[in-house]
Image (cartoon, helix red, strand yellow):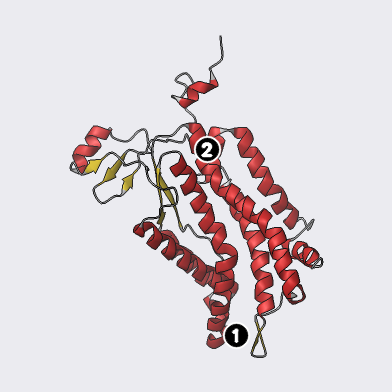
Amino acid sequence: MGTRDGRADLVDDDPFSRPQKGKIHRIHQRQSSDGTIHFQTNPQQLSGMFSQLLGGFQQQPATMHDGRIWHFSKTEKEHLAFAMGAFTLALGLMQVGGIFSINNVGIASWVLGILLAMPVMFIAIGPAFLLHEIGHKIIAKKNGCWAEFRADPRGLRNGVLVAALLGIVFMAPGAVMVAGLVTRRQNGHIAVAGPLVNLSLFIIGVPLWGAVIGLTGAAEYANSDYLVNGSLIWQSMVFDIGYYWLGANLFLGLFNMLPFGPLDGLKVKDWNESVFYFVLAIFALPVIGIFMGVWGPSALLQNIAGYF
């Protein structure tokens, strides 16, 4: 028996293959009158005609992207700002150890600690999240899809609450909503774009922050407090920005490449397993190296700073 021509994937799925567990459904079906995109992700759901009858005829085909790639709607900008604000607050709470650390340092020092930590986290980790999502958006729009970021209010609220109570950040800020009919390959390209943005930011960040730390003398203030005897140690803040920049992009890229649920890894694996394992290894190997003590962002930045 002959093998299936791979080019057929550009047209349809293989009708002779067995249904795959966790199959990615790529048809985003409809758009309500208020602009909300609705997704049909479960093949066992009611038929589209019956769903429209229940929905009251307020649905219409989703409008595909035909404008500028870098266009951001007013609603999207509001959602991005909301997500970035809540994410930064959660990171600031993580830095001070949550609300239960107030007893150890006092309310004034605790609030001041958050106010100093938040700009560091915003500069260091904000781009890892923001540009990751924009990477998805740009590639989706290049493939003719409608794509906009939408914050998840419940995920943001729960993330801030966890950070406040436990001093750790585990948050689902939101995601880029994509509407359009795409092939498995295109869907994989859209998914892998986010982690590849994180990889690029990591690579760029190594020489960039190494040079900044070296030129500012911040290497001498590694692991130092931001405020000592009433004096602001800004060099310590600079060093932490570089440190968290590298770590955040590695861990965020690795997390999103896990092949579970709505994460990017499952969509990439659905498209091309070789690409999936290659990109996963790119993130997993350095992260494993950190835990094994083979290398660390702090030591790497200090070594590079020594050349400046």
x 72%, y 51%: residue:
286
Where does residue 168 sit, x and y in percent of width and height? 56, 66
Say few, some or many: other residues with alpha carbon within 10 Å of mark 2 (under 14 / 14 to 19 / 20 or more).
many
Residue at x 58%, y 46% (from the top left corner) = 257
Identify which residue is drawn at 51% across, 68% down: 88
In the image: residue 63, left or right of residue 287:
left
Q: Quadrant of residue 150?
A: bottom left
Between 28 and 131, the residue placed more toward the observer is 131
User: Which quarter of the rendered picture does the N terminus lie within?
Assistant: top right
Q: Please state the horizontal and vertical placement of residue 253, each as a whole percent of the image.
A: 60, 51
Q: Amino acid at mark 1?
A: Val
Q: Position of residue 59 (x, y in %)?
A: 24, 42
> Where the C terminus falls, by quadrant?
bottom right
- Say which residue appears at 49% left-offset and 65% top-offset: 87
Find disc 2 in the rendering and name its residue.
188
User: Regarding mark 2 in the picture, which secondary structure is present there?
Assistant: helix
**Cα distance, mark 1 to mark 2?**
48 Å
Q: Which mark is residue 105?
A: 1
Amino acid found under the numbered disc labelled 2:
Gly
**In the rendered image, the vertical position of residue 108 relative to residue 118, given as above or below:** below
Give the x, y percent position of residue 64: 35, 41
Please state if 230 lies on the left or on the right of 143 as rendered: right
Above-or-below relation of 116 to 283: below
Asked whether, in this view, residue 85 is left or right of residue 63, the answer is: right
Q: Is residue 167 visible?
A: no
Mark 1, mark 2: which one is toward the viewer? 2
Residue that sits furthest to the front in the current view: 68
Apparent side of residue 52 relative to residue 177 in the rendered image (left or right): left
